[in-house]
Image (spheres, rainbow, N blue to C red):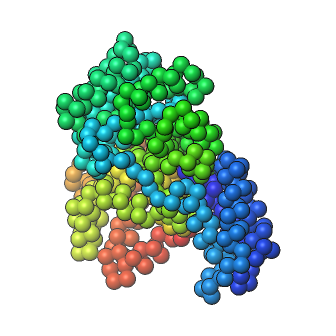
Amino acid sequence: MFETLTDRLSRTLKQLRGQGRLTEDNIRDSLREVRMALLEADVALPVVKDFIERVRNQALGQEVLGSLSPGQALVKVVNDELVAIMGERHDGIDLDRKPPIVVLMAGLQGAGKTTTVAKLARRLIERERKSVLVASADVYRPAAIEQLETLAREVGAEFFPSSGQQQPVAIARNAVDAARKSGAEVLILDTAGRLAIDRQMMDEIRALHDAVEPAETLFVVDSMTGQDAANTAKAFDEALPLTGVVLTKADGDARGGAALSVRQITGKPIKFIGSGEKTDALEAFHPERIASRILGMGDILSLVEQAQEKVDVEKAEKLARKVKKGKGFDLEDLRDQFMQMEKMGGLGSLVDKLPGMGAGAAQALQNPAQQKQMKRMVAIIDSMTPIERRKPEIINGSRKRRVAQGSGTQIQDVNRLLKQHKQMQRMMKKMGSKGGMANMMRGMKGRMPPGFPM
């Protein structure tokens, strides 16, 4: 998400030249470029106008410290204003209530509500240690109830059964009773997709809201709809007392207009941002971290949280000890590294959060061909015997043919993997030696994907 905006803003702010002070003259062109970048990102026009005016007022006459260029000073102002329009701080689910805490999900058809219910349930179970019951009041979409049941089983949430023959309000009331009796701390209620102009369906969700009196009413919206996401959220808020917004399909949106428009237009916080179909792909929305990502400064805090949650610390420490002792980095270790990266959302997800990487690196590593190549390499390693993984030097021609056949690849693919492993082995050896990290970075230069700023 934000790749286009990040690229454009980075180029614009780097071009700024000036003396010791930001003036109308030396920021005029930059602000015009920032304005165009925001409009191209499909940020709502009123939001863009207000943003540019606030940046101009904050920037004009601001003294530039000796260690900063005017461009760097303007980056600070732009960063602060980005944080301001997105809501200043993270607003999470209000869990400080008497259980069962009811979370009502609303939104358009196809926005990803049912998947988001599962993602939110998993987050509450794993991070907040809450017992969660999920229920579906979507009696219109074929297999909606069955889909939620399958997802509930996957994330470890309790499922309240319902059927297409029941009335949505009756389902909702019965689900609240069931949550109370079972001792579930949180009830997440999925609802049918509806348009704000569909009076009958809007009356229904208002009735659902009145019946369950939710602690949270979240509007789930597809981020790829840009500023329309904010306008639709506003229309729903006028009919329903929303407490927050969840942006979905962020991995398919390179612009970011929705994230920058929603808070300003609706007055409602973005609480979470989802990407992909996997049930762990839901992030808390932190305005200051998102602003940092947009300006190409990375998001180290989110990266650390992601690593703490998903990386196998024992395996990582074992590899570190092995490298430090100068022992070989074998194919088992390589496979483990691939699997750890996959758990953290793939290379593209990691690069997106690293400072200074820029849009080019993230796009190169999010390329489906890159992801496919990683899976192919794992398949090749899986087709080897344990001794071959530990001692790849014994893999001769006949073994290569067997491995290629077993993994559904070509001998050239096996050769390519063995060559890449040998390069990584050399880097790991350098890393284990004195001054190893610097040596390793020098060794990697020129072998990274296009856009990687080495």
What residue lies at 29% left-to-right and 65% top-to-bottom? 329
What residue lies at 55% left-to-right and 61% top-to-bottom? 83
The quarter of the picture where the C terminus appears is bottom right
Is residue 26 toward the left or the right of residue 415 in the image?
right
Give the farthest residue toward the left: 182
| Residue 127 pos. (x, y %) | 29, 51
Is residue 149 at all visible to an observer of this figure? no
Is residue 43 at all visible to an observer of this figure? yes
Q: How many marks?
A: 0
Nearest the viewer among 207 and 190 is 207
Depicted 183 relative to depicted 65: above or below: above
Q: Which of the 4 quarters of the picture holds residue 390?
A: bottom left
Give the farthest residue toward the top: 165
Nearest the viewer among 133 and 179 is 179
| Residue 100 pos. (x, y %) | 27, 37
Nearest the viewer among 289 and 253 is 289
| Residue 118 pos. (x, y %) | 35, 36
Nearest the viewer among 354 and 30 is 30
What residue lies at 50% left-to-right and 67% top-to-bottom? 355
